[in-house]
Image: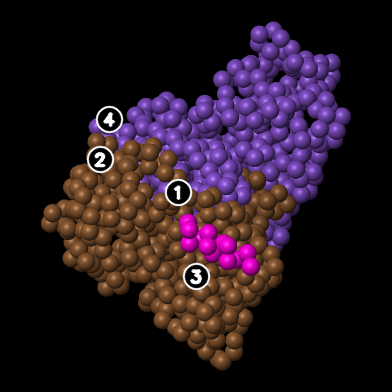
Chain colours: A purple, B brown
Amino acid sequence: MNTNKLGKWDVVVVGGSAAGVTAAITVHRHYPDKKVLIIRQEAKVPIPCGIPYIYGTLGDPEKNLIPDTLLEANKIEWQVAAVESIDPKAKTVASGKGIVEYDRLILATGSLPTRPPIPGIDLDGVFTVEKDVDYLRTLQKKLETAKHIVIIGGGFIGIEFADEIHKIGGKHVTVIEMEANCLNLAYDPEFCGEMEKLLVSRGIEIRTSTKVKALEGDGAVRSIRLQDGNAIDADLVILGIGSRSNADLAKASGLDLGATGGVAVDRNMRTSDPSIFACGDCTEKISFFGGHACLLKLASIAELEARIAGANLYGIRRESTGTLGVWCTAVGPLALGTAGLTETAAGKLGYKVVCSSVEGPNRHPGGMPGAAPTKLKLVFEANSGVLIGGQIRGGDSVGEMTNIIAACIQKKMTVEDIATFQLGTHPALTASPIAYHIVNAAEIADQRLRKET
Amino acid sequence: MNTNKLGKWDVVVVGGSAAGVTAAITVHRHYPDKKVLIIRQEAKVPIPCGIPYIYGTLGDPEKNLIPDTLLEANKIEWQVAAVESIDPKAKTVASGKGIVEYDRLILATGSLPTRPPIPGIDLDGVFTVEKDVDYLRTLQKKLETAKHIVIIGGGFIGIEFADEIHKIGGKHVTVIEMEANCLNLAYDPEFCGEMEKLLVSRGIEIRTSTKVKALEGDGAVRSIRLQDGNAIDADLVILGIGSRSNADLAKASGLDLGATGGVAVDRNMRTSDPSIFACGDCTEKISFFGGHACLLKLASIAELEARIAGANLYGIRRESTGTLGVWCTAVGPLALGTAGLTETAAGKLGYKVVCSSVEGPNRHPGGMPGAAPTKLKLVFEANSGVLIGGQIRGGDSVGEMTNIIAACIQKKMTVEDIATFQLGTHPALTASPIAYHIVNAAEIADQRLRKET
């Protein structure tokens, strides 16, 4: 341990990815007189959601970085070092560089990709998705010669990697998913099916309801043995099966952890130590829907938590209403978005729901350039008529339409609120006001609710 | 007057454009047992917002129609006839086709384009924007040979017509606007300026702070005399300077009119006769902001009112919260959106405001395909921190981003609500969560509000 004393900062942030950077910026915005230091492991920090796009679209990990100019512009100092321990009593952080004193500490230590204990998991050629430029470049180098790429896990990261690697050309790409559908945590089956169909049409092999028994090879991976006994050729494997909160440092410092192993925080993002806050993938998440622990990890959630934590450091003013879950993804011309609960997830949680779906172009008339067939499904709680979820499939509009649904869920809008939503439309930019998806889906749900009650 | 008795319908809707069609569909959705009849003047009904796009993009008025299949699918009958009078006591409507009895009546008679009483206004070659296929085709025919096209009025319709006509090629197109900026009712000057610059760069002449004195010519228009004495060549003139509510039928029937001449309605969209509702451009509008009468006329407002009127016919269940005003427009790669009050409009209404603007790409990293520089401005009421307006300039995301702002305004979200907005992001579809425009603009406004209080 390096006992070199590096001085005192008002605020020290451990971790420099999405949550850490946003927390530091938020501190600077709210408390411009405070000295802020980020201690991070990485010399360069990848944009987490952009990682798959390095391989087919961007071409270089260097084109997918959170720029340090963001820190400079917000007068945030930073050190590149691995934090080894925290002493909450002395209010110090020890890294390879030495010891730093703090007045307030923010933990933003992120998550670690899951490596399941299956035979062969440590063979050469088996990659996880690490937020590390050198590691990502090594993967890129290996991809140059690999022919049979298998991606284990058909979530967002899995399908985005599959499509991006397939774009390189000359590869056979397979996605293995143990559930009946890819993307099944975020979408109901009718939406998952469309994405699977598109990936197959682009030449990617999709194997759902398929479990991996072992990775086989001699030093380097050569094939994947499935639980049904069959084998698939594989000279490069990418694991995209989730991640766990990196709460090791918090645990070693005596902070409370939550039921799923994340750093326990209250609604103000404060840990069990009143001077230490936490945000991002490292924290235990509480659902917007009922408040149970949930395992969602997204950069957008991390940064929301960072804005809450950062603003609360010297005076509590923001409160989390619980994790909603808002995502989107895109493969070629097809984009999918989801906010809140799917019909399937709502059913599992015990909600009685009424759903409605509408389909139509996202321009008007449909002959306008850029028009994409767009399908939207809303999920309402049947007793209150309150919106609890929505899913969209379409073109470039999907990202922001998902955020409209997210706004409606957050403000607990009812079917009537949404049926009388005041919207703007334009031929070149949106659906027509007669056919505007969100409003029409609410009208259809309204009819169904009246029939049922 | 044709006294032929045509029978009785439960619900008769006068007018078959955006408001009338949506009202009829809404009635069918909420009261599927009711017989619904639309009486409309037009054999074919243009999509109002699509009209400019007939000339450069769509190529034919027939490609810009509200399809009658919408009526068939919702079991709505229709007659093509001009309604001549309404007898609210007898509950009958008289048209050239005969007399129809009703139980509930919905007026959706729309608006009439303004033709100011300036000399020469009735010369050949002077067009207004009529929602009439034959008229629009006549305009298209005249455009084939016209060389010097002048558009009077630099609002949405004016600039959209200008760009679409310019796309035909071989025309000199001039827009005359009497205010200092085009689009000045919907945008603050910094946004208007960008649109003007783009139009000029595409070869369109823009003359702001310019007033028309007379249209000159011998039979057909040849030039436009300005108030400063100068003249502009013009062999075709399009007037895009607004419209007035078409409330003539309502007035003749003894219904109350509002202060600005629209059909007076309560928050349930009911007229002074309890069996007659009204919606769309023909009604008097009440502002979302303070409730004063306002002159906004948009298809999206018309259809919102239609959904309120239609649902309330046999049991009041929906209430208007007042007209918000949400628009967008696009010229080539540049789209502009606005919701609620501009800084200028808020100032005129006596609001004390705090504004904030942010700028950045609508994809992340900025090198992702489709990234467009996007600028967003939010307008908050300074005492409450409640959002009252927002404007955006950018690419394809602008339409739906405008609707996110609209949702935030409708739910009276504060600067803190928006700073902790739960959003979803994706590299190929949205800005990054660190730089997400709406949230970051709220954070900046938050800093300013704290400084001021």
Asked whether the residues under the numbered discs 2 and 3 touch, taking CB atoms below 8 Å apart as contact, a structural biologist would say no
Q: How far apart are the alpha carbons under marks 2 and 3? A: 38 Å
**Mark 3: which amino acid?**
Phe
Q: Which residue is mark 4?
A: A452
**Residue B7 shows in this picture:** yes
Q: The C terminus of chain A lies in which quarter of the figure?
A: top left
Q: Which mark is residue A245?
A: none
Asked whether the residues under the numbered discs 4 and 1 touch, taking CB atoms below 8 Å apart as contact, a structural biologist would say no
In this picture, which residue range is highlighted in magenta? B133-145
- The x and y percentages for residue B234 are 59, 78
> SS at mark 2?
loop
Q: Which residue is mark 1?
A: B66
Q: Is residue A131 left or right of residue A259?
A: right
- The x and y percentages for residue B153 are 51, 74
Count of residue discs: 4
Asked whether the residues under the numbered discs 3 and 1 touch, taking CB atoms below 8 Å apart as contact, a structural biologist would say no
**Mark 1: which amino acid?**
Ile
Sequence-first disc among 2 and 3: 2
Q: Which residue is mark 3?
A: B127
Q: Main secondary structure of the magenta part?
A: helix
Q: How far apart are the alpha carbons under marks 4 and 1? A: 32 Å
Q: Which residue is mark 2?
A: B35
Q: Disc 4 vs disc 2: which is toward the camera?
A: 2
